[in-house]
Image (cartoon, rainbow, N blue to C red):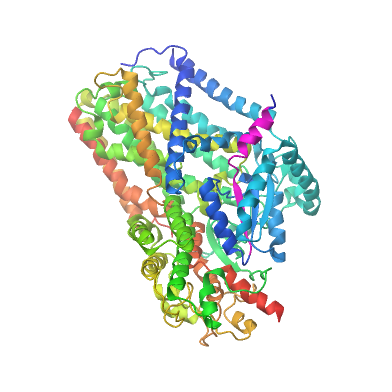
Amino acid sequence: MDLTAALLRAAAARPHVLVASMPGGTPVRLALERELRLRDLPVALTPADADILLVAGPACPELEAAVERLWQDMPAPRRRAHAEDPREVGRAVANARAGLARRESAESAGAHERAGGEAPRGRHSGGGGHGGGGDDMDSPAGLPMAGQGPDRDGLTLDRLHVSLGPFLPDWPHGLTVRLTLQGDVVQRAEVAAPPAGGGPAAASFWTQPWARATAGERVQAGEAARRRAAAHLDSLGRFLAVAGWPAAATSARRLRDDLLGGASRESVSPRAARLARRVGGSRTLYWLTRGLGPLSAREAAAAGVAGPAARADGDVPARYRLWLTTVREDVDRLEERDPLDPARHEPPRGPLPTPRTPSEALSPPRTPPAELPAPRTPSAALPAPAAPSVALAAVLPRLLEGAELAAARLIVASLDPDPDETAALTVGTAHE
Amino acid sequence: MSDAAPWWSVLAAPALLVALALLAVAADGVLSARAAGRPFALSAVARPLLEVPRLLVAQPRRLPAPDMPLWRIGVVTVPVAAVLSVMVVPFGPFAVSGLSVGLVWFNAMEVLTWAGLWLAGWGPNAAFSLVGGYRYLAQGLAYELPLMFALMTPGIGAQSLRVGDIAAAQGGLWFAVWMPVAFAVHLWSVLAFGFTGPFAYPAGGDIAGGVFGETSGPERLLLSAGRWLWLAAGSAMAVPLFLGGGAGPWLPGWAWSLVKTVAVLALLVWARGRLPMIRADRYMEVAWVVLLPLSVLQALVPALVVL
Amino acid sequence: MNELSAAVSLLVVALAAVGVLYAVSWWSRVSAAPLSAPPFNSGREPAEHAMSRYHVRWYPVTMLFLAFDMEMVFMYPWIRVISAVGASAVIEMFAFLAILLAGVVYAWREGALRWT
């Protein structure tokens, strides 16, 4: 009996899937997360644990290197699939699983990619050998040792450079924050320029009803409420997963999927209330997150942040509780048939920029160049309205510096910039 | 009370521990299937076990300049220490060894996970794993002392460090009844040395799995097994310490031990999903300023009683 | 069975099980050639080796922990003799614990248990 073949077939029944979501790929990611949840296919946190790499959304040239990096680091047996459209998700997953079950393909795929992948990263090839033994003292295995730098107390300490994003579990894919860590304390954080979307310029999935209403289409208020509730639940799902509460994250995501699937107010409302009680009422979660990432309404306004992050006027718990309140209000408005008034009901992350030249909308509150320290006091000149997520990403460095890695992740998750919004703008620039 | 165990108990005890761990995995599978809204199917019980073939076929991975020996030692230590810890846990009247310092033995094995997990974080030479390894040390500094007092409290009640004697000393009243703080701290700490649920801090999703991040193949299997084995071992230990061991009407001693262990295990598996991950930077203060004095006061109660 | 042989045989059994696991994996894995891969850095190349002098800010807690941990060494034998020695055993032990707890309170007031 062929042991390996039998084990491969068994393993293909429950592979772990590493998801790489592209700018503009939110609908595909949502369909994929639903598929994985219902079929009991766990999400892999790192390439080491992944069997299938699933790229969700239109291919993005700027992220190709990062996707390739993930793929090269996955041990065989492995498969790779790409779904550009939500309808392709089921088939992409099924094909990848079928491929995993076949011994020849599992082996050849691994072997081929290994041969192909070795060359471009020669500087790691020395790592194959004997633990610790290096090429020379300064850079064993072709990598330098950690350098030193002063910390905030004036001590000289080793520091590591770690990238959060573009691809990290429960992270807004595409956003990249480069951290300088001393121990697990963020000493410095820089937000990298967002990748341009690879697909056609389109509004983010979460702001579509508002974009259509602005374009003159008649959109029902209930539809916008449904979209906004789902957007907040999506953010909450990420936040709760980062907070290490997978059970609550699953509840939020199930509710999100049901809302997007068109569930009625009667079926959703009690569950939203239960989630709000369980998460919003959790003293433990409050105790764990209070005081993290304070962003007052004034600072938010100065940084160009409007929307819930500004209205929460406080720390991480203030922001997730506002999301929960908004979800409950929106769920009650699901059946409203009046036309959407963007002035009265804003999009999930704040008002959209008035359509002028997209480059103007993109520029003002961007992060300063890497060499300059982030300004402690925002300049008096009020920035022009930009996509809300651009402003959210821009406040990150100031909030992250000095935080612990765990706190930094919670802060990002509680602001949750939507890379699709920034990508939509950048695409617009590229097409002009 | 603990009779001399037959030679095959060195095989039976690990087998039983593994069976209990598998039961916990299955229960967790059912719970998460329900939470995820999947229609109930019997396969939910067995599906998590598909991890085993999945990890057995995986190609080995080689990171740049890993500390392979230390990494391996760390990964192997966690499950092996869990197996060794049950040596002193009586199952009904039998224990693999009725060691006179059984309590200290269990405590020592549990502390080995500190070394194991830190090495598992250090070995791969990866930033997120390293953070995970150090996270466990911080977590250990917080949970360990209350746990030590919680383990010692029944020992004071029985004036013995032999686990069998402690179980036998609860003839009239279970220690859980008049040492509730110690019992609660013990259960709470089982989640901590099992690095699971609210104490999954060293393996947090926010650092891409932490100590698990770079593991694949048999290493990952061993580390995950260690998690569930510790959950089972901690539950098994709670029975002789706090729940009267194998004492009970009608059924033989071993059956009562089994029933009580499964009940404690079920409680812990259920509790895993109830709370968010507790970060050591917030927990440290609570552990030292609230839990530790409470545990000391709890230890005072039996000390006064046995006088 | 005597205690040492019980412990050693249990260790042998556990290590044998680990060995069997490695053997099965060695036998059944799809490829024996290791995949050489850098550590996960969110899709980017790592900038340097992660092994470094790690800045732990809970260092003062380790000192506090050591003090208490040593105390446990006294407590284990003490358990066996409480009623034989009588009230003085309990008084002395808990007076000692009270002193240590006073130290904890002091460290707490100094902010040693907090670092964020």
At a point 54% along the width and 76% down the height, the residue shown is A391
* A364 versus A126 height, above or below: below
Q: Viewer-proximal residue, A186 or C31?
A: C31
* C91 versus C60 height, above or below: above
Q: Is residue B70 left or right of residue A430?
A: left
In the image, is residue A25 part of the stretch drawn in magenta? no
* B60 versus A373 height, above or below: above
Say if residue B122 shows up in the picture: yes
Q: How many marks?
A: 0
Where does residue A42 sit, x and y in percent of width and height? 55, 46
Where does residue B25 sit, x and y in percent of width and height? 46, 36
Q: Is residue A191 left or right of residue B3?
A: right
Where does residue B267 sit, x and y in percent of width and height? 35, 38
Q: Residue furthest bottom?
A: A381
Q: Viewer-proximal residue, C75 or A94?
A: A94
At a point 58% along the width and 27% down the height, the residue shown is C18
Which of the image's four quarters has the N terminus of chain B? top left
At a point 24% along the width and 35% down the height, the residue shown is B179
Q: Viewer-proximal residue, A132 or A235?
A: A235
* A307 versus A6 height, above or below: below
Quarter assignment of residue B59: top right
At a point 51% along the width and 19% down the height, the residue shown is C8
Say if residue C52 shows up in the picture: no
Q: Is residue B42 left or right of residue A123?
A: left
Where does residue A119 sit, x and y in percent of width and height? 81, 51
Residue segment shown in magenta: A3-22
